[in-house]
Amino acid sequence: MKIIAIDSSGLVATVALASEDTVIAEYTVNYKKTHSQTLLPMLDEIKKMTELDLGSVDAIAVAAGPGSFTGLRIGSATAKGLALALEKPIIEVPTVDALAMNLWGISDVICPIMDARRSQVYTGFYEFDKDGSLKVLRSQFAEDMGEVAGMLNVIGRPVVFLGDGVPVSKEIIAERLKVPYRFAPAHMNRQRAGALAVLAARYYAEGKTVSAAEHKPEYLRVSQAERESGRRV
Protein backbone atom coordinates (compact mmCIF):
# COMPACT_ATOMS: atom_id res chain seq x y z
CA MET A 1 0.00 0.00 0.00
CA LYS A 2 1.20 3.51 -0.84
CA ILE A 3 -0.32 6.78 0.33
CA ILE A 4 0.45 10.35 -0.70
CA ALA A 5 -0.25 12.67 2.24
CA ILE A 6 -0.83 16.42 1.97
CA ASP A 7 -1.21 19.03 4.71
CA SER A 8 -1.53 22.75 4.02
CA SER A 9 -3.89 23.52 6.88
CA GLY A 10 -1.54 25.92 8.66
CA LEU A 11 1.64 27.90 8.11
CA VAL A 12 3.53 24.76 7.13
CA ALA A 13 3.24 23.02 3.76
CA THR A 14 4.10 19.33 4.01
CA VAL A 15 3.86 16.34 1.68
CA ALA A 16 4.81 12.71 2.23
CA LEU A 17 4.85 9.34 0.49
CA ALA A 18 4.36 6.38 2.81
CA SER A 19 3.78 2.63 2.70
CA GLU A 20 2.30 0.44 5.46
CA ASP A 21 5.26 0.81 7.82
CA THR A 22 7.65 3.25 6.14
CA VAL A 23 7.68 6.98 5.44
CA ILE A 24 9.45 6.82 2.09
CA ALA A 25 9.77 10.57 1.59
CA GLU A 26 8.67 13.73 3.36
CA TYR A 27 9.02 17.35 2.21
CA THR A 28 8.15 20.09 4.70
CA VAL A 29 8.49 23.84 4.26
CA ASN A 30 7.78 26.49 6.89
CA TYR A 31 8.66 29.65 5.03
CA LYS A 32 7.17 32.79 3.48
CA LYS A 33 5.52 31.25 0.44
CA THR A 34 1.90 30.49 -0.32
CA HIS A 35 0.88 26.85 -0.43
CA SER A 36 -0.23 27.28 -4.02
CA GLN A 37 3.45 27.94 -4.83
CA THR A 38 4.84 25.01 -2.87
CA LEU A 39 2.59 21.93 -2.86
CA LEU A 40 2.80 20.84 -6.49
CA PRO A 41 6.59 21.41 -6.79
CA MET A 42 7.06 19.46 -3.54
CA LEU A 43 4.94 16.60 -4.85
CA ASP A 44 6.84 16.61 -8.11
CA GLU A 45 10.20 16.51 -6.29
CA ILE A 46 9.10 13.52 -4.20
CA LYS A 47 7.87 11.77 -7.33
CA LYS A 48 11.23 12.29 -9.05
CA MET A 49 13.40 11.45 -6.05
CA THR A 50 11.54 8.20 -5.31
CA GLU A 51 10.96 7.29 -8.97
CA LEU A 52 7.29 7.00 -8.07
CA ASP A 53 4.78 5.56 -10.49
CA LEU A 54 1.68 7.53 -9.53
CA GLY A 55 -0.46 4.67 -10.72
CA SER A 56 0.92 2.55 -7.86
CA VAL A 57 -0.53 4.90 -5.23
CA ASP A 58 -3.57 3.48 -3.39
CA ALA A 59 -5.01 6.65 -1.88
CA ILE A 60 -4.51 10.38 -1.31
CA ALA A 61 -4.59 11.53 2.32
CA VAL A 62 -5.29 15.15 3.17
CA ALA A 63 -5.57 17.22 6.33
CA ALA A 64 -9.30 17.85 6.09
CA GLY A 65 -9.54 20.69 8.58
CA PRO A 66 -9.81 22.74 10.60
CA GLY A 67 -7.17 25.32 9.75
CA SER A 68 -6.50 28.24 7.46
CA PHE A 69 -9.46 28.62 5.08
CA THR A 70 -7.18 29.36 2.14
CA GLY A 71 -4.71 26.63 3.06
CA LEU A 72 -7.45 24.02 3.42
CA ARG A 73 -8.91 24.93 0.05
CA ILE A 74 -5.52 24.62 -1.63
CA GLY A 75 -4.83 21.24 -0.01
CA SER A 76 -8.33 20.03 -0.80
CA ALA A 77 -8.09 21.09 -4.44
CA THR A 78 -4.69 19.41 -4.79
CA ALA A 79 -5.96 16.16 -3.24
CA LYS A 80 -9.09 16.22 -5.40
CA GLY A 81 -7.09 16.79 -8.56
CA LEU A 82 -4.76 13.89 -7.82
CA ALA A 83 -7.60 11.58 -6.79
CA LEU A 84 -9.59 12.36 -9.93
CA ALA A 85 -6.61 11.96 -12.25
CA LEU A 86 -5.48 8.71 -10.64
CA GLU A 87 -9.01 7.41 -9.90
CA LYS A 88 -8.07 6.87 -6.26
CA PRO A 89 -9.97 7.49 -3.01
CA ILE A 90 -9.28 10.28 -0.55
CA ILE A 91 -8.56 9.68 3.12
CA GLU A 92 -9.81 12.63 5.19
CA VAL A 93 -7.74 13.07 8.35
CA PRO A 94 -8.78 15.62 10.99
CA THR A 95 -6.01 18.23 11.15
CA VAL A 96 -5.73 18.31 14.93
CA ASP A 97 -5.67 14.50 15.16
CA ALA A 98 -2.75 14.42 12.72
CA LEU A 99 -0.89 17.01 14.80
CA ALA A 100 -1.35 14.86 17.91
CA MET A 101 0.26 11.91 16.06
CA ASN A 102 3.54 13.85 16.12
CA LEU A 103 3.86 13.02 19.82
CA TRP A 104 3.43 9.25 19.61
CA GLY A 105 4.23 7.52 22.89
CA ILE A 106 3.81 10.59 25.11
CA SER A 107 2.00 9.71 28.36
CA ASP A 108 0.67 13.23 29.00
CA VAL A 109 -2.56 14.62 27.64
CA ILE A 110 -1.73 15.99 24.18
CA CYS A 111 -3.24 19.36 23.29
CA PRO A 112 -2.49 20.61 19.77
CA ILE A 113 -3.44 24.26 19.33
CA MET A 114 -3.72 26.08 16.03
CA ASP A 115 -4.18 29.84 15.90
CA ALA A 116 -7.78 30.39 14.74
CA ARG A 117 -7.63 34.20 15.09
CA ARG A 118 -10.27 36.24 16.92
CA SER A 119 -8.77 35.07 20.27
CA GLN A 120 -9.59 31.44 19.52
CA VAL A 121 -7.68 28.25 18.81
CA TYR A 122 -8.51 25.01 17.03
CA THR A 123 -7.73 22.24 19.44
CA GLY A 124 -8.60 18.80 20.79
CA PHE A 125 -7.47 16.53 23.64
CA TYR A 126 -5.69 13.22 23.01
CA GLU A 127 -3.71 10.43 24.60
CA PHE A 128 -2.08 7.21 23.44
CA ASP A 129 -3.34 3.82 24.60
CA LYS A 130 -0.93 1.17 25.80
CA ASP A 131 -1.05 -0.43 22.35
CA GLY A 132 0.10 2.86 20.79
CA SER A 133 -3.20 3.82 19.19
CA LEU A 134 -4.35 7.44 19.32
CA LYS A 135 -7.31 7.97 21.64
CA VAL A 136 -9.49 11.05 21.25
CA LEU A 137 -10.45 12.46 24.65
CA ARG A 138 -12.28 15.37 23.02
CA SER A 139 -12.55 15.72 19.25
CA GLN A 140 -11.34 18.88 17.56
CA PHE A 141 -13.19 22.12 18.28
CA ALA A 142 -12.74 25.91 18.19
CA GLU A 143 -12.62 27.76 21.51
CA ASP A 144 -11.09 30.63 23.48
CA MET A 145 -7.73 29.53 24.90
CA GLY A 146 -8.74 30.55 28.40
CA GLU A 147 -11.71 28.18 28.21
CA VAL A 148 -9.44 25.43 26.88
CA ALA A 149 -7.15 25.88 29.90
CA GLY A 150 -10.16 25.51 32.18
CA MET A 151 -11.14 22.23 30.51
CA LEU A 152 -7.61 20.90 30.93
CA ASN A 153 -7.66 21.87 34.61
CA VAL A 154 -10.77 19.71 35.02
CA ILE A 155 -9.02 16.74 33.39
CA GLY A 156 -6.28 17.28 35.98
CA ARG A 157 -3.34 15.62 34.19
CA PRO A 158 -0.02 16.92 32.83
CA VAL A 159 -0.35 18.41 29.34
CA VAL A 160 1.98 18.82 26.37
CA PHE A 161 1.17 21.53 23.81
CA LEU A 162 2.15 21.82 20.16
CA GLY A 163 1.07 23.76 17.09
CA ASP A 164 1.29 27.26 15.66
CA GLY A 165 -1.09 28.49 18.36
CA VAL A 166 1.55 28.00 21.06
CA PRO A 167 3.44 31.30 20.55
CA VAL A 168 0.26 33.40 20.81
CA SER A 169 -1.16 31.35 23.72
CA LYS A 170 1.82 30.98 26.07
CA GLU A 171 0.82 33.91 28.27
CA ILE A 172 -2.75 32.64 28.74
CA ILE A 173 -1.48 29.11 29.40
CA ALA A 174 0.88 30.41 32.09
CA GLU A 175 -1.91 32.44 33.71
CA ARG A 176 -4.79 29.95 33.56
CA LEU A 177 -3.37 26.43 33.58
CA LYS A 178 -3.13 24.80 37.03
CA VAL A 179 -1.66 21.44 35.96
CA PRO A 180 1.94 20.70 34.92
CA TYR A 181 2.60 21.45 31.25
CA ARG A 182 5.33 21.58 28.65
CA PHE A 183 5.79 22.47 24.97
CA ALA A 184 6.87 20.11 22.21
CA PRO A 185 10.33 20.82 20.70
CA ALA A 186 10.73 22.41 17.27
CA HIS A 187 11.01 19.16 15.29
CA MET A 188 7.67 17.94 16.67
CA ASN A 189 5.52 21.05 17.02
CA ARG A 190 4.17 21.65 13.51
CA GLN A 191 2.27 19.71 10.88
CA ARG A 192 4.14 16.72 9.45
CA ALA A 193 2.75 14.82 6.48
CA GLY A 194 4.55 11.70 7.69
CA ALA A 195 2.44 11.65 10.87
CA LEU A 196 -0.68 12.32 8.83
CA ALA A 197 0.18 9.40 6.53
CA VAL A 198 0.58 6.98 9.46
CA LEU A 199 -2.86 7.89 10.78
CA ALA A 200 -4.30 7.79 7.25
CA ALA A 201 -3.02 4.22 6.80
CA ARG A 202 -5.11 3.15 9.79
CA TYR A 203 -8.16 4.90 8.35
CA TYR A 204 -7.58 3.20 5.00
CA ALA A 205 -7.38 -0.24 6.62
CA GLU A 206 -10.71 0.50 8.32
CA GLY A 207 -12.30 1.52 5.01
CA LYS A 208 -12.58 5.20 5.96
CA THR A 209 -12.24 6.76 2.51
CA VAL A 210 -14.34 9.03 0.31
CA SER A 211 -14.38 9.77 -3.40
CA ALA A 212 -12.93 12.98 -4.81
CA ALA A 213 -16.47 14.18 -5.48
CA GLU A 214 -17.50 13.59 -1.86
CA HIS A 215 -14.51 15.29 -0.23
CA LYS A 216 -14.82 18.74 1.27
CA PRO A 217 -12.84 20.50 4.02
CA GLU A 218 -14.09 20.73 7.61
CA TYR A 219 -13.79 24.39 8.62
CA LEU A 220 -15.48 24.14 12.07
CA ARG A 221 -16.63 27.75 11.74
CA VAL A 222 -17.62 30.17 8.97
CA SER A 223 -15.04 32.29 7.17
CA GLN A 224 -14.62 36.03 7.67
CA ALA A 225 -16.21 36.67 4.26
CA GLU A 226 -19.27 34.65 5.28
CA ARG A 227 -19.50 36.47 8.61
CA GLU A 228 -19.33 39.84 6.86
CA SER A 229 -21.95 38.72 4.35
CA GLY A 230 -24.24 37.66 7.19
CA ARG A 231 -23.95 41.06 8.84
CA ARG A 232 -25.05 42.77 5.63
CA VAL A 233 -28.18 40.65 5.25
Image (cartoon, rainbow, N blue to C red):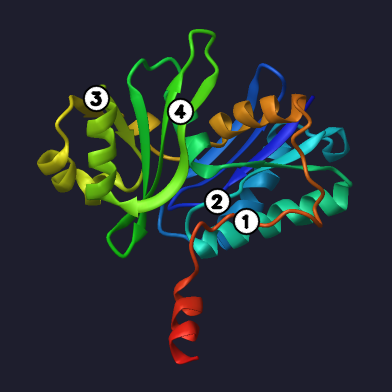
Q: Determine which residue is flagged by label 1.
A: 217
Please determine whether, in this image, residue 59 is positioned above or below residue 105: below
Q: Amino acid at mark 2?
A: Gly
For marks 4 and 3, the one nearer the N-term is: 4
Q: Give yes or no for contact between labels 1 and 2 (Cβ–Cβ under 8 Å).
A: yes
Q: Give yes or no for contact between labels 4 and 1 (Cβ–Cβ under 8 Å).
A: no
- Residue 228: which quarter of the image? bottom left
For image coordinates 23% across by 52% down, the residue present is: 168
Cα separation, mark 4 vs mark 1, equals 21 Å
Q: Nearer the viewer, mark 4 or mark 1?
A: 1
Q: Nearer the viewer, mark 1 or mark 3?
A: 3
For image coordinates 67% across by 45% down, the residue present is: 43
Where disc 2 sits, the SS reads loop
Could you say where residue 116 lies in the image, as x and y percent from the top left?
38, 57
Q: Amino acid at mark 1?
A: Pro
Can residue 3 be seen from the camera position used here?
yes
Q: Amino acid at mark 4?
A: Asn
Density class for disc 3 (Cα within 10 Å; few <14, some 14-19, many ≥20) is some
For image coordinates 48% across by 54% down, the residue present is: 67
Q: Determine which residue is flagged by label 3.
A: 156
Could you say where residue 1 lies in the image, as x and y percent from the top left?
79, 24
Cα separation, mark 2 vs mark 4, equals 17 Å
Disc ID at residue 102? 4
Q: Nearer the viewer, mark 2 or mark 3?
A: 3
For image coordinates 71% across by 19% down, the residue present is: 20
Q: Amino acid at mark 3?
A: Gly
Where disc 4 sits, the SS reads loop
Where disc 1 sits, the SS reads loop
Cα separation, mark 1 vs mark 3, equals 33 Å
- 175 relative to 203 in the view: left or right: left
Disc ID at residue 65? 2
